[in-house]
Image (cartoon, rainbow, N blue to C red):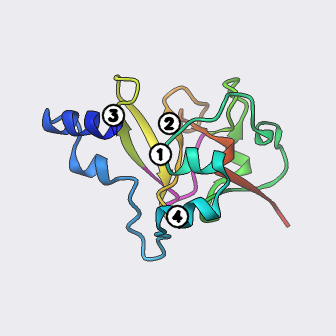
Amino acid sequence: MIRRSLLSLLSGLGLVSGAARAASQPTRSDAVLLSDADWKKRLSPSQYAVLRDEGTERAGSSALNLEKRRGRFLCAGCDLPLFDATTKFESGTGWPSFFEPLPGAVVTKTDFKLLLPRTEYHCARCGGHQGHVFDDGPKPTGKRYCNNGVALRFEVAA
């Protein structure tokens, strides 16, 4: 409720565009659109808190921080492949971090939850919140996609 009110206020001031507000709403032809009740059935409580309520898991709590095998990281909400394991790096932040998503896998929007704008990213298929992207990552992109581990599932390469 407070978040919606803040978003409405920022929108009224022209600080949030309609495109930014709608960025987490999937528009793909293969979009996964479920009711809130269906998401609650599909996801664990911690997954629901992150993917649907844009929460953040505790730093260092994900086993995926230590994942180093070849494979892909998929959205825990809809299984869309988001990152190849070759783009994962140790950021020291306590969350799985990547320097580049797979093409067309994520959409971004501006987040004002901490009052200063940050770039938030979501799964392009189901709109599930994944994390935030920062400009302090390694080459070649210089980006750090800081992901909630609970929002991901790892698939080992065959």
Q: Around disc 3, counting alpha carbons within 10 Å, would you say few (fewer than 14), some (14 to 19), or many (20 or more)?
A: few
Q: Amino acid at mark 4?
A: Ala
* Magenta stretch bounds: 99-107
**Residue 5 location, x and y as percent?**
26, 37
Which quarter of the picture shows residue 94? top right
Task: Report the residue marked by disc 4.
Answer: 37
- The residue carrying mark 2 is 133
Type of the residue with mark 1: Tyr
Q: CA distance from mark 1 to mark 3?
A: 21 Å
Q: Residues within 10 Å of mark 1 (few under 14, many from 20)?
A: many
CB under 8 Å between discs 1 and 2: yes
The image shows residue 145, relative to residue 72, as above or below, that is above
Image location (x, y in percent) of residue 96: 69, 38
Rounded to the nearest angstrom, the CA distance separating label 2 from label 3 is 24 Å
> Could you classify mark 4 by the number of other residues whose Cα lies within 10 Å: few (under 14), some (14-19), or many (20 or more)?
few
Residue 150 placement, left or right of 63:
left
Query: Mark 1 against mark 3, which lies toward the viewer?
Result: 3
